[in-house]
Structures are given as C-alpha cells and as structure tokens.
Amino acid sequence: MGFRNLHPARDYVGSIHHDERDCDEAAIGRRGNTKLVAQLNSPKSREQLQANLSTVVAQVQSARAEGKEPDEKKVVAISNALLEVSQNHPELPETWRAATELISYKSDKLRSIQGKLPPCDFKGVQPQMKQWTVGPEGGVNGTYGYAFYLSKCSLKLEDVPDLANKEADAPFKWVHMVDGIYRFPIFLTRGEVIYDGGPLNYDAGFAFINCTFDLHDDGVPSAGGQRILTAALKSEDLTRVDTMSKQESTANFTGE
C-alpha cells in the first residue's frame, strides 16, 4: 500500500453507525467505498494513516457509548480496509487498536443476548475427536477433528495454559507435533473471547464458533494475537473465526 495525496485526517467526519449523517460524503455510507475507507487504503503518509486509524477508534467508541447498533455494510467495509492495513502495516499500534475496537463493537449485539459466562476451566481437559463435515473447497466429507473442545465459557487468551501433550496417539488433522510433543487446537462454541494484547502461552490454532469478543490492545500484539485479530476481521458476522488452514476453515462443526 503506497501513500497517495489525500485530504488531511482532520477533514474526516461521519460515523459507522446509523444516523442522519449517512448522506454526508465523508460518512461511511451504504453505497460502497467511502472517503474514510479510501483514505485508509491509500493514505498520503504514515502519519495520516495513523490519524485515519485513530478516527476509526474514536467513531467506534462514540457509537458504543451511544448504544448504536453496528451498520453491517459500513462495518464490513471498514473491516476490509483494516484487514489490508494489518497486512501492510502490522508494526503500527494504531492498526491493532482500531481492529480490537471494531471487532468488539461487532460482537456487542451477541454479547447482550449471551449474558455472563463462567471462566473456561482447563483442569482435566483432554483432546477429543469429533465429527466434522468439510465443504466443497476441502473436498472431504465426514472427516474428524482431534482438538480441545470448550463450550459456553469465557476464554482469556493470555491465561490459556500450555496444553502440550507427550502421550497422545492422534494421527489426525490439525495436530501439531514438534520434538515428539503434540499440540492440539482449541475450539470454543458459544463462548466469550477476551484478549488484552499480551503474548499467548499456547497457540496451536483456535476456532471460535458463535462467540463474542472483548478485545483491548494499545500496542502491537504477538504473532498469535495478530492471527486471531486478522481472522476476526475476515469474518463478516463473527459466527466463525479461526486461525487454521484453508481446508480446515471450510469445516462446519456438527458437534455442540
């Protein structure tokens, strides 16, 4: 992404939620790419890109404070722009702060329905094998996934312990084995994902199905954290967010 000649950040106005300013050309409207999206994709300089990202953060915070529901098309447009920024400028803290604010905002509606959940408990948790059906891109039907399966709990990503397993006998998909130690991905269904930008103790792949997200980050997250935030930006409605390979990401969980 190059830096092109665009208007200063102070000229940006508008909002990513429904209001009377939708018709303003600088607002994030419903008719496709708008000024702010274009300025995110093609800023004049690094400084202006940082200002653009701060504008996104301010608009999201304002919308959440006012209790405004997300406008799906506007949020998708901004998500796509932030995805491109995250790929081109992962070194900017503002990139990830904007991403965490937007993803959390997208899940506010689900959070109000879900209610408070207990913390996920890893005591005695063992990897299990559950049936999946894989879509046309994967070309497989009736495969199995060997992983840690959790449901209806709150998962603080930085608090996940190292779940490496030396004794597993699991020649299945999704198993990561290094130096004779097995590491299995974690699947969370109808839960809450909490992340404050810190390093992850365990990162063998995650899949979040119908989960909410409570994310905060004022710095540059670890590589594992970046993968999770990028996957969430790619998901239009957050019903499925995962950090695994293309074939694995086409799988539809048929369990809990």
Image (cartoon, rainbow, N blue to C red):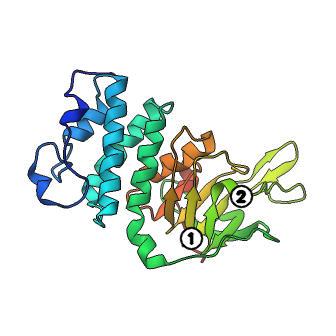
Comparing 141 with 187, the one in front is 187
Q: Which residue in the structure is indicated by mark 2?
A: 160
Q: What residue sits 35% from the left and 39% below the top?
A: 53
Judge the density around disc 2: few (<14), some (14-19), many (≥20) Cα neighbours within 10 Å. Answer: some
Along the horizontal axis of the image, is 232 left or right of 173? left
Q: Which residue in the structure is indicated by mark 1?
A: 191
Q: Quadrant of the N terminus?
A: top left
Judge the density around disc 1: few (<14), some (14-19), many (≥20) Cα neighbours within 10 Å. Answer: many
Q: What residue sits 18% from the left and 35% below the top?
A: 11
SS category of the residue bearing label 1: loop
Q: Position of residue 103 (x, y in %)?
A: 43, 55
Q: Position of residue 64 (x, y in %)?
A: 34, 61
Q: Earlier in the sequence, mark 1 or mark 2?
A: 2
Residue 142 visible in image = no
Circle 1: residue type: Gly
Along the horizontal axis of the image, is 153 left or right of 168? left
Comparing 179 with 111, the one in front is 111
Quadrant position of residue 185 = bottom right
- Location of residue 133 with respect to 114 vertically, above or below: above
Q: Position of residue 40 (x, y in %)?
A: 30, 35
